[in-house]
Every structure is written in C-alpha cells, then in structure tokens.
Image: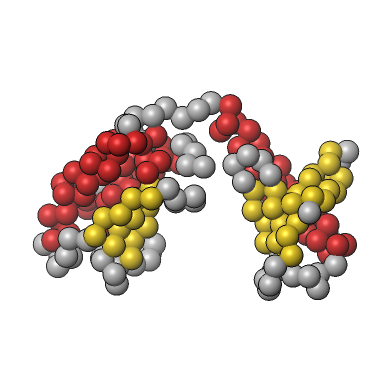
Amino acid sequence: MIKGVFLDGTKIQYDLQYKNVKNINLRIKPDGTVHISANRRVSQKIIESFVLSKSEFIRKALEKYENTLAVPPKQYFAEDEICDVITKICEKVYPHFEKRGVEYPQIKFRRLVSRWGSCHPTKGILTFNINLMYAPIECIEYVVAHEFTHFLQANHSSRFYEELAVVCPDWKARRKRLKEISIR
C-alpha cells in the first residue's frame, strides 16, 4: 500500500509491505520508488518515524538515481559478447591463482542487482554480472581479479587487498572508475 510522510514541505511516498520480518527494512529502487517492509505489529507512527529518520539517506539515494537515469551508461560490449570477454579475462588471470592451488572455477553469468560479481569459494563458483558490458575492460579485469582473490581470502581484510594488489596493482583506481557506473 502506498503511504506518505511530509518532510520540509516535500512528500516522501513509499510502498509499505507487511512481512514476517524482524526489523523495518528500507529499499530504494532504481526507478525512485521507496519500499518499506515491516512486521504487522509495527505501528504506522513508528514506520513514519523510521522513514523520517532515514530522510537524508532517501534524499541522497533519489538524487543519485535521478542523475544516473538522466545519462544512460555507455555500452562497451554487446550482451552476446560480454560472457566471452569475461571468460578470456578469467583465463588470463587464472595462472596466478593456479600457482596458489586454486582450481579453475565454474563461471556463471547473471543479471545481479547490487554487485558486479560474487565468489563462492567452497563451491568453486564465480558469478559475474551481465551488466559489466557497461564497464570498460580495465574495470572488468578488476572485478575478475577481485572475485578470484576471494579464493585466497574469503573476506575483505587487509590481507585480501594485499593479495589483490599482486594481480591488479592499480585496483583502487579501477574500483573508483567502476563505482561511477550504475548497475541498476
């Protein structure tokens, strides 16, 4: 159900869904809709108070999406070729990890909502976002190196970034450029 609260004369509309959740959850979709999920036992007053407490976050997120939607991202690769591009980069990066005892992983491709890739070290699976077609090759190389590094370090500790720097010394610059691209 659509609800709304006023903040500084501006109405913030949100879609409220009651679910079996422990906390009040807030999500902002790329189209600018604000989604709130809450337990049925939470009063409307508490939900409105929650939305108002997150007003600065909501404002910034909506601004970000407004700017992102205004300029469509440049497409560097066709959708039917991005899988081959990523696979070739995986083959290029793999020898470094093979020396460290990493078996060649199963590579999967999907449209991911909130990340460029994921690694499941125990299953030996790397999943890459098809939307990497909107990223320049150096950013794709960074994502591949980043995900492969998770086979050596499952977390994002300082050791992880030391390992990543061996394969991708300029990872910080590449990551910065990648963050400028919206994947929504």
Q: Could one spot residue 18 in this view of the protein?
A: yes
Residue found at x 11% / y 62%: 99
Coloring scheme used = secondary structure
Of residues 7 and 31, the one nearer the viewer is 31
Q: Which one is nearer the viewer's eye here, 108 or 161?
A: 108
Image x and y of residue 18, in percent: 74, 65
Determine the residue positioned at 46% across, 37% down: 181
Q: Is residue 118 above or below residue 72?
A: below
Q: Is residue 64 left or right of residue 148?
A: right
Q: Position of residue 137 (x, y in %)?
A: 29, 35
Q: Is residue 162 visible?
A: no
Residue appearing at x 78%, y 70% in the figure: 40
- Closest to the observer: 51 or 32? 32
Residues 19 and 156: in front is 19
Q: Quadrant of residue 46?
A: bottom right
Figure label count: 0
Q: Which percent across, then down, holds residue 138?
A: 29, 37
Res 78 → quadrant: top left
Q: Is residue 93 left or right of residue 110?
A: left
